[in-house]
Amino acid sequence: MTLIIGARCQDGVVIAADRRRLSRHERGPSTTKLFKLSCGAAIAGAGDDAVLNEARILIDRQIKELANGSPVTSLFDVVEIAAGITNDLVGRYQNAMEESFGYVLSGTDNLNTGKARLFTVFGAGLSELPWVFLGSGSSYARPLVELLLADGNLPAQDAQKIVVYIFSLVSNVLTTVGDGIDISICKDSQVAGDIAYLKEASLDRLRTAILNTILKG
């Protein structure tokens, strides 16, 4: 199962994904759910591992094929490609998938310039959003994302730290999420950064800070 979080920040977009793989309620080896496409955009997927891998390969292949004819020059081109392939695969595998299937994408408007933007591709549609989450951990992450990230006022580097704590909190109450966090930052006027792998954070300091805030408030 999965938790994907994406958030538009003061100066860019943060996307993060856990690595836990659960198949028919049995925990398997860790898997990567966040990737950087050949065009520079970042993409993270929730759903069955095999279907996600098939979709990612098809998305990247179509991007490369189009580069020889009508070049992919904008993030929206990438989003449209992802939406078409996702829609086809949802129709093909809808009765066989254990988890709802969809993607979060980030990149700059023109892939190497412009404002960083955040899109979700889920089922038969796509949306641009200021923040988003996908996967089985969504209901647990939602109140934390709304409280800490929804206003978009934090710099991306600070938002990254917050996201790590959100994943750590969710993984403490939901065993289907975890095994560390892959995270990517796409700054305005830059391509998505390299993907960093981070361990869950210790919650001791957070617990102390929360208690102090409540008791002194």
Image (cartoon, rainbow, N blue to C red):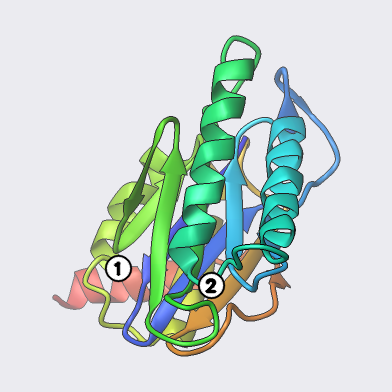
* Mark seen at residue 73: 2
| Mark 1 surroundings: few (<14), some (14-19) or many (≥20) residues within 10 A | some
Q: Nearer the viewer, mark 2 or mark 1?
A: 2
- Residue 39 location, quadrant: bottom right
Q: Dot 1 lies on which element?
A: helix
Mark earlier in primary sequence (2, 1) = 2
**Percent coordinates x, y for residue 163 in the rendering:** 48, 67
Residue found at x 73% / y 35%: 49
- Relative side of 44 to 9, left or right: right
Quarter of the figure that contains the C terminus: bottom left
- Determine which residue is flagged by label 1: 148
Residue found at x 53% / y 77%: 111
Camera-nearest residue between 88 and 106: 88
Residue found at x 62% / y 17%: 92
**In the rendered structure, which amino acid carries the disc numbered 2?**
Thr
- Residue 69 location, quadrant: bottom right
Q: Is mark 2 in CB contact (under 8 Å) with mark 1?
A: no
**In the rendered structure, which amino acid carries the disc numbered 1?**
Leu
Q: Dot 2 lies on which element?
A: loop
- Relative side of 205 to 194, left or right: left
| Mark 2 surroundings: few (<14), some (14-19) or many (≥20) residues within 10 A | some
**Percent coordinates x, y for residue 183 in the rendering:** 61, 68
Quarter of the figure that contains the N terminus: top right
Q: Residue furthest top?
A: 95
